[in-house]
Amino acid sequence: MLPQRNKNRNGESKRYSILTEKYTPMARYKHIDTNPRFLPVDLARQLLPGTFEHALNHLLDHEIDLSDFDKRFVNDLTGALAYPPAMLLKVVLFAYAQGIVSSRGIERACREHVTFIALCGDSGPHFTTIANFVSTGGDDIARLFAQILFICDRQGLIGREMFAIDGVKLPSNAAKSRSGTRADFERQATKLEAAAKTMLARHREEDATSVEPNLRAKETKRIKRIEHDAAQLRGWLTEHPEDRRGAKGAIRKSNRTDNESAKMATGKGVMQGYTGVAAVDGKHQIIVEAQAHGTGSEQELLIPVVKALQGMLTEDTLITADAGYHSEANLKTLDQMEVDALIADNQMRRRDERFADQGKYKALPDPLHDKSGKKKQLSVYRPEDFYHHPETQTCTCPAGKKLYGNGSDCTINGHAAIRYRGAKRDCVPCDQRDRCLRTPDKTETRQVAFFPRQPDKPETHTVKMKARIDSPEGRSQYGQRFATVEPVFGNLRHNKRLNRFTLRGRKKVEGQWKLYCLVHNIEKLAHQGYAQ
């Protein structure tokens, strides 16, 4: 049995134990009320120097010009008083820093969280006001981003030595199931109309017989829903007479929820969303440019970002980007713009001896969770997948093995060529034989031929970039890219939990992406001692 609490004549609390049959003194404690109704709090003292919220509050009250936001209000003579844009920006940016993206969640925090109460002055804006402010920010948010970038530069946080460009794919407020081409939507509408017609015919046949009222009501409701969906499809097709087109004219899937978003493949499956592109400075990881695009093709995104950065580039600035941004057209455009850049190609790591053993560190797929279905047969490696070293007269295969010369002065179809053959000790036990040989059960080794560049034929920009990025200096410079841009995306997606967009339309999504990036930049200012 548990000991019993008793009080003596003097009101002292004692504990009685049955085992010892004695009373022992017992400690008394104050009552702790965890839900007080009235609490005297100095709101200004809740914003401690050195914190994100203190830097944010100082920026918007003393440094940033928000007069552009005043143009959206016409209530100088009549109308209700509006919430100050500075206050709305404070609560939105601080909420994003806490991983709160929902406007309803921000409204709740302004009622219950003391730091939010301090930032909004206990005014408690409605969630519709917050949602409208974020979705209509647009160009005003872009100008705010530029002003904070100027302050970061004034604080010495931007070095301009290297800008690393990369993108992250984030889901948007759009249904993936509503994606397709016009032909897909035509088939869906025809199928729905045929289903509704069949159900109506059956309905008329059953009129002669007695049917339970509940079943008849359910069937009627289902027919109306199908007809409504078919009418929506026909209306969308009327409003959009043409398919979406890519940069090269290819048809892209439209989306009836957000037609500016894109269906994109990621490492975790296919999603409907936008690609948030960021250019990050190498000195203190300040985001100097942020754009959102409704496409998963990164090659299309490089030049728009570089053009937006031209005002910040110097003679010594280096642009770096991964293989997703590599194309001959992009390299040619950068050369014409006289922009110094290092853009990796798909075979860069295979040519680097430091990554010769990277295959053995890859995790094997889990057969219990592999729902990819039947895998497609991979294409055979082409000569472009082999790296030719003209200076040393050697060749490296995709598996990282050296091939030896099998004819330095031969002719193939009337053109001079250099042939290489793999060694049996390398090709026979290789785990990539199925991708390297068309008939691996009959052919032992792989042969590959290269045609030397003709003297009158100019060297391509891709060949020049390969030679530069494979040099010791190029590898050292490009190696800084990963440590510059990837931690930024890790901070936004993992630490801040800003891993989705809540708006629709490219302009609105780009404004929200800039707000996400502003959270990162202001946090950098706070960590560097700003406004302390």
Image (tube, rainbow, N blue to C red):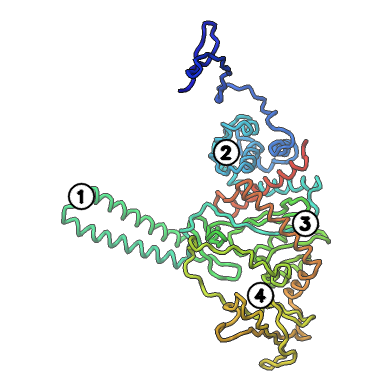
Alpha carbon of mark 2 to alpha carbon of mark 1: how far? 49 Å
The residue carrying pointer 1 sits among few (fewer than 14), some (14 to 19) or many (20 or more) residues within 10 Å by Cα, namely few
Give the mark nearer the N terminus: 1 vs 4.
1
Tags 3 and 2 in contact by the CB under 8 Å rule?
Answer: no
Check disc 3 and give the amino acid type. Answer: Gly
Determine the secondary structure under disc 2: helix
Question: What percent of the width, then of the height, locates residue 4?
Answer: 48, 18
Per the image, the residue denoted by label 4 is 398
Instruction: Specify the label residue 311 is tagged with.
Output: 3
Per the image, the residue denoted by label 1 is 212
Instruction: Specify the label residue 106 is tagged with.
Output: 2
**Left or right of 431, for residue 192:** left
Give the mark nearer the N terminus: 3 vs 2.
2
Whether residue 329 is visible, yes or no, is no
Give the mark nearer the N terminus: 3 vs 4.
3
Give the mark nearer the N terminus: 4 vs 2.
2
User: Mark 1 against mark 4, which lies toward the viewer?
Assistant: 4
On-image quarter of the C terminus: top right
Alpha carbon of mark 4 to alpha carbon of mark 2: how far? 52 Å
On-image quarter of the N terminus: top left
User: Mark 3 against mark 2, which lies toward the viewer?
Assistant: 2
